[in-house]
Image (tube, rainbow, N blue to C red):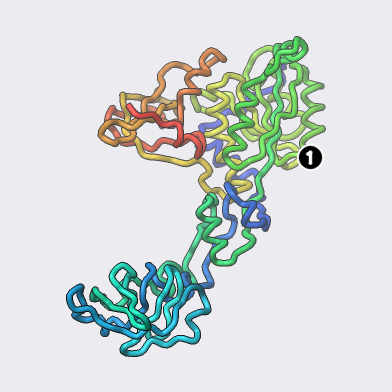
Amino acid sequence: MPLDYKFKPKPYEDALKLAFSSFKPRASRELVPVTSALGWRVAVEVVSNKYLPPNHIAFYDGYAVMFEDTIGADVTKPVKLRVRGSVLKEGDERELVIEKGYAAYVSSNAPLPRGANAVVREEFTDLVGDYVLIKKEVSLGENVVFKGEDIKPGDVLLEKGSILGAQDLGLLMELGVSRIYVYRKPTIGIIATGDELVEKLERGVPFPDNYSAILAFLFNMLGFYGRQIGIVRDNIGEIEEIISANIHLFDALALVAGASRGLRDYSGKVLENLGEIIFHSTNLRPGKVSGLARVEGKPVFLVPGHIGSAISCLYNIIVPIMSKIYYDGIQLVPKVKARLSSDVEARPGSYTFRTVSLSWSRGGTLVAAPHIRRMGGSTLLTILSRAQGYILIPPGSKLARGQVIEVSLFSPLESLRWSCE
């Protein structure tokens, strides 16, 4: 690295605080059709202005009655009520009134006619001409879903920051909501550096930089648009050129590799030339040489070239900083509780990032098995492939086998990859 460049190391927590204060919040929202909102995050709390159900409705097919008329009814002594019409759908109930001695047929989910206060299930009745024989006593409100029993005006349906699932969209449709405010997904451009990568590219290697591809995939699963911009040589001019050409096209850039102190590690110097270095190097292990710069007011991340360090940088630096700037600081990484399968600790003075594999024990307990081997070159991608999440251990801390800990998942998809012992 050029001799005139100096690292700006910070303790991990201080680095995050400095990053948060170095950028103004830029979260923005967009109004999208409910039918297109699957997987997006709610930007404005959704509060109901309706009752659901909007009327008292029948839970089963049967007969709407006054419960008082059924007192004492059983198979040997049925109660005889005159049938006054039927309610098969909303609106049919408007012309009906249930009085003493009368009943009306109702379909499941159909509104109750006025005067009715219970429903007798059809299997406990016999229809004889214009009369129905009630063979079971019912209580007040039995087999009825009352107006607003599910939702009332003022109820919070979806909290800000929650991920919209299929069932959430179905609920919104049921309430007649056609559009919803969601967070705009920030764009992150990924630039890979390295003469060796360019040589692979020129030889026609299909995937000369799979680490950047992994970052892009993970960004896309966490609520960003990650896009690989390209690969450049370890050349200050070329790196400056690609950053300058793309900084206005994205909300943030990630410059992968060249972040260390090697002779051809130019990322820090380039960003110093183009903008301001916020920090470069923390006490995060792996991921020590991760960094952040501000170029034309936008964040540009220095991402280490080793896969373990790159993943640590993504989750411990990029995601929280991008969330603070573009997502109002909401938690983008899902978390679960699990029991440790072995002891694990962090060296004094360093935060330790450990990937873990998750599995269900025969007793139904979620177990986290930490990976102790170092995550370095591509040969250790197997560690990442077998993991579903990670833990970040504070400096000097020791976590004991059997201890219940919080595990951060790589993405919501990871819950589908847990195995059973």
Horizontal placement of 336 versus 207: left or right? left
Q: Is residue 86 visible?
A: yes
User: Is residue 77 shown above or below 12?
Assistant: below
User: Is residue 340 shown above or below 328?
Assistant: above
Query: For the residue marked with disc 1, what is the amino acid?
Result: His
Residue drawn at x 48%, y 64% is 156
The foreground one among 57 and 377 is 57
Q: Residue 110 location, x and y as percent?
A: 46, 72
Q: Residue 161 location, x and y as percent?
A: 54, 52
- Callout 1: 10 Å neighbours few (<14), some, many (20+)? some
Residue extending furthest toward the front: 129
The foreground one among 231 and 217 is 217
Q: Give the residue number, with chain letter if any, for mark 1.
A: 248
The foreground one among 386 and 254 is 386
Residue drawn at x 53%, y 49% is 163
User: Is residue 272 shown above or below 77?
Assistant: above
Local SS, label 1: loop
Residue drawn at x 71%, y 13% is 205
Horizontal placement of 243 versus 208: left or right? right
Residue drawn at x 51%, y 57% is 159
Q: Quadrant of the C terminus?
A: top left
Q: Quadrant of the N terminus?
A: top right
Q: Could you say which quadrant of the image residue 292 lies in?
A: top right
Q: Residue 368 location, x and y as percent?
A: 36, 30
Residue extending furthest toward the bottom: 100
